[in-house]
Structure formats: C-alpha cells, structure tokens
Image: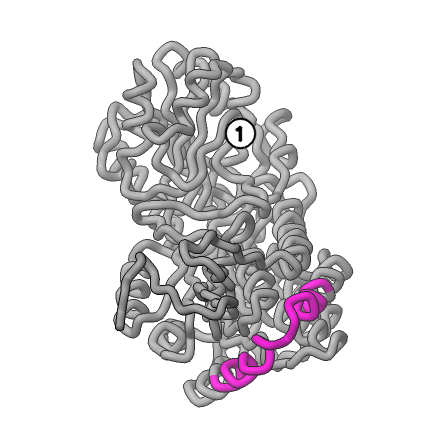
C-alpha cells in the first residue's frame, strides 16, 4: 500500500498512550465526517436492529447501521444490471470523467474518510491518510486507462484479411472487501471497473460500514456532478447472506473478493459452478530474506514497518524473517530494540505507531499462535497485552509486537495469524533461504535485503521467490498502484490495481475482417 515507510520511526523511548477518546467523542467524529462527505445515513443507537458499527479504539459499539435486506439486495443487483446496458456503450473517456470527479472529491475529503478508517479499522492517522491517497492514485491511474484500453492487430495468414483483438465491458462486478483496507481495495476495483464499462455492487466488511457509507456518498455525488447513472455503483451492507447473494447471482459477471483463504475456498467453486469469473485476494505469509551483505539499517527499518504497521493486520504484513546465521543475532537485537520504541495506543494520537487489534478474536488468535510457537521451541520477546490508560476498556485489545526465534518452520509458522507476530529463522545458503520462503501455502509478498546483485536477481528469477510480489531492499508491504497487486497459491491468483489488471474486468473478442473479394479458409483448407 502507499502508506510511507518513513511514518514508522524506530527511535525514542518506549511509550504507551495514556488517554483514549470516549465512545461519545468517536460518535461525534464519525457523524461529522459523514456529514462532510454528504452521507445521509440513518444511524441508530447501539442495540437496535441492524448492523452494529464499532471501534477497536475503545471496543464500543458506536451505532447501528441499516442492514440491506434480501429484497433490497435483489433490487440493487437488478439496477446495476440494467445500468450496465447503457454504461457499457458510454465512451470510455466519458466514463473516465466519473472516476476523475470521484478522485477530486476524495482529495477534498481525504481527512474525513481517513478519520472514519481510523475509527473503524484502528489504523494510525498517517496510514489511514495513506490509504485514502491510494484511492486518489488509482482514480488518476484509471482516468488515464480510460483512453488506453488497447487491443491489438495480429498478422493474418490470409491475404486481404485483418485479424485483431478488442476488449469489451464484462458486466456487473461484485466487490467483497475486508476490514483492514476498508476503502482502498474498493477503489482499486471500482475505479478500474467503471472505466472498463462495468457497474459495481459492493459488500464491505461488516466491521467497517461507516467508511462504506462515506465512499458510496462520494461516488453518488460524483455521478450526479458528471451526469452518470447513479446505479453504476451500489452498496449492500450486511453479513454472509449478502455476500452469498453476490457469489451466486448469475448477473454478477465477476466476483472480486478479498479475505481469508477459507473464504476464497468457498467463493471460488461457487462462482465457477455458474461459470462466472473470480478475482481472489486471500492470505499472505510473507517473508524477508536478510543476507550477510545486507544493509542492516535499511533492513531493520523495512522489517519493523512491514511487521508492526497496521498492528500486523495487513495481507502483506511481514510474518517471517529468514536471516543468514551470521547476522541473525544482531538483527534480532536491533528489531527488538526498535519494537520497544514503538508507541502503542490511540491511533488518532499523532505519536502513536501501533494501534489496536480489530477485535477479541484477533487477540485470541495471537495468544494461541504464541503459545503454540513456545511449545514448538520458540523464544518469544514481546507480544504482551498493554493498557493504553486508566479508562481502559477490556473490550479493546492493544498489544506489543512480538519477535519469535524459531528453530524451524513448524505448522504455526506456516499459518497466517493476523497480528504483529514476526517469526525469525536462520539459513546457511541462499538456496535454503529461497526454499524456506516458498515453503508456505501462501504466495503473496516477499523481499530480500542484499547488496549482492546476483542474490537479488536470483531471488526474482523463475527459480526464486514464488510470490506475486518479490522485492529487493524494501519490505513486503507498501505496494504502488502502478504495479499489479496479488499473489499465487493460496493467495488466490488474482491481480488488482495497475499494470494490465484491467483485463480481468473486460471480455476479449477476436475479430477477423475480410476486406477482399475472395474467401480463403484458414490453414489452406479447400472446401467445395
């Protein structure tokens, strides 16, 4: 993601923020942000029927948000399907004008949307602003793309014939997003899908309904401003049943789903059964190889941000360090020293660098993983639950990042735990390090820290890292929108954002034009 690594400072004394905002203060901030973006949502008090909207900052439920009914979901899908019939024949540069306006509104309201991200997802302010900037960036990318949906001309074997490929809008795109990037992933899909001529139906995470209301309001404002159909983007708020409606509906041409491997294992076969298309962004168990020649100052900085940023709750978070035996001890000492300096607490506070875990289950998963690692022979530093202040609510979960020296890659190391746990393993040869990098079921992001050109090139080669992202001298998180984002194996194989990822949102047609007066057949076939 585009959040800058330089926001993760690693100097200064270890601190814990001592005051949290009250639930009432968070409610007022959320209402103010929603008013600013023009979202006129009916927010009920906690406990009313509907979808609870909470904040990991305090652990409180802030509001109850209206939940989309099955009837409303059906109507939204039908409206998006109907809108597609006109949107697909709208010239692509005209479609781009909608996305350009959305980018302008996001620029105007970046602080409002970012504050909602902080409130609902617990991201520190700089990371939340970085996520909104990523939305703006992908809008700019997509606007340029609206004039570059290129096909190709192919040499025909028949005289007087032209052979070519053209790309056409695919249909309605169903987008299912996760809590940890509640707005950027929606923008990745929506900005590109809209310029490709598709319409979008979005089911956000149940944990982040307010950010979804804000984004939907801005999209509707953009559509009104440029005269685009309001129905090109629809929002469905709810749980599993709403997601299943998108997965099973034959009018949804493409399901783009971000979440767990288990979710992807259910979504993929169900969409395939009706011959729909899927774009899956699932789990990651990302590693960084640290070689003897590595610049350790650079490596520590990259490792600490990638492992502790977003409290370890990114799909690209660094889970494993594979360090050469000669540098492992020094590296661990420096990482643990840096970890002790990371302020933990209210993500809204300017000095905070590590916010809360999203909920109790995340904390239980972290505790369980650390207990298993200890039983497997791991040596654990950190990983404690901490109190951010005297008004601390037991429903909020703040932890210190953990470093775990492991004797081997056991089953728990192969599992993705969505928490700030960094396993450290050692290697003797580069072949061994690459094998360890590739040994896990997931294949999203990877990195190597080295000043040896041969090591760097080998890591990126066909027999190197098997991940969709392979970096050199930079951490596993912090991808730019210009490149295709996604991974292999249990990560799902999908690609979003830049490069030629737009092709997932379109259908390809091969065209042959005969401009001669003869009818030669392919391969020289003679008939009649």
- Would you call the spot at circle 1 few (<14 residues within 10 Å), some (14-19), or many (20 or more)? many
Residue 373 visible at all: yes
Vertical comparison of 443 with 243: above or below = above
Left or right, residue 525 beside residue 111: left
Near-viewer residue (59 or 156) = 156
Boundaries of the magenta span: 78-100
SS at badge 1: loop
Near-viewer residue (281 or 125) = 281
Vertical comparison of 400 with 169: above or below = above
Q: Where is residue 423, by image quadrant?
A: top left
Give how far across and how far down residue 351 sits, in percent: 67, 39
Near-viewer residue (436 or 518) = 518
Residue 58 visible at all: no
Near-viewer residue (525 or 121) = 525
Q: Name the residue located 46 percent from the left edge and 60 percent from the top edge.
A: 504
Label 1: which residue? Answer: 474
């Amino acid at each position: 993601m585009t959040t800058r690594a330089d926001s993760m400072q690693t100097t200064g004394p270890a601190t814990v923020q001592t005051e949290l905002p009250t639930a009432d203060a968070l409610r007022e901030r959320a209402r103010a942000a929603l008013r600013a973006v023009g979202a006129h949502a009916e927010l009920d008090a906690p406990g009313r029927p509907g979808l609870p909207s909470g904040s990991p900052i305090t652990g409180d439920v802030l509001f109850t948000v209206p939940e989309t009914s099955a009837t409303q979901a059906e109507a939204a899908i039908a409206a998006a399907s109907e809108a597609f019939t006109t949107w697909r024949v709208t010239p692509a540069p005209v479609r781009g004008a909608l996305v350009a306006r959305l980018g302008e509104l996001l620029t105007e309201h970046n602080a409002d949307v970012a504050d909602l991200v902080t409130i609902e997802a617990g991201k520190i302010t700089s990371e939340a602003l970085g996520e909104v900037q990523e939305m703006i960036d992908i809008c700019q990318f997509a606007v340029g793309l609206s004039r570059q949906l290129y096909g190709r001309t192919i040499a025909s074997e028949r005289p007087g014939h032209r052979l070519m490929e053209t790309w056409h809008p695919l249909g309605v795109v169903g987008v299912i997003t996760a809590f940890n990037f509640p707005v950027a992933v929606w923008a990745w899909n929506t900005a590109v899908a809209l310029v490709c001529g598709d319409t979008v139906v979005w089911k956000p995470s149940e944990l982040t309904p307010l950010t979804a209301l804000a984004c939907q309001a801005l999209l509707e404002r953009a559509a009104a401003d440029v005269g685009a159909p309001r129905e090109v983007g629809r929002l469905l708020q709810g749980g599993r049943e709403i997601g299943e409606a998108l997965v099973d509906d034959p009018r949804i041409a493409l399901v783009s789903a971000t979440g767990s491997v288990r979710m992807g294992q259910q979504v993929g076969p169900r969409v395939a059964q009706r011959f729909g298309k899927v774009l899956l962004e699932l789990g990651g168990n990302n590693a960084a190889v640290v070689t003897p020649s590595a610049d350790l100052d650079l490596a520590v900085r990259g490792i600490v941000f990638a492992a502790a940023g977003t409290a370890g709750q990114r799909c690209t978070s660094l889970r494993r360090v594979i360090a050469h035996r000669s540098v492992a001890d020094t590296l661990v000492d420096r990482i643990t020293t840096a970890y002790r300096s990371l302020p933990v607490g209210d993500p809204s506070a300017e000095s905070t660098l590590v916010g809360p875990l999203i909920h109790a289950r995340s904390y239980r998963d972290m505790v369980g993983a650390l207990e298993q690692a200890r039983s497997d022979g791991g040596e654990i530093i950190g990983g404690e639950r901490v109190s951010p202040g005297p008004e601390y609510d037991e429903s909020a979960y703040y932890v210190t990042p953990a470093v775990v020296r492991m004797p081997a890659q056991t089953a728990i190391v192969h599992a993705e735990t969505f928490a700030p746990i960094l396993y450290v393993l050692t290697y003797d040869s580069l072949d061994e390090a690459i094998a360890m990098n590739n040994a896990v079921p997931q294949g999203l992001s990877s990195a190597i820290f080295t000043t040896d050109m041969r090591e760097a090139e080998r890591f990126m080669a066909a027999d190197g890292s098997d991940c969709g992202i392979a970096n050199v001298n930079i951490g596993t998180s912090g991808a730019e929108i210009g490149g295709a984002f996604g991974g292999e194996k249990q990560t799902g194989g999908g690609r979003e954002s830049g490069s030629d990822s737009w092709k997932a949102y379109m259908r390809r047609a091969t065209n042959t034009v005969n401009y001669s007066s003869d009818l030669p057949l392919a391969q020289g076939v003679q008939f009649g």
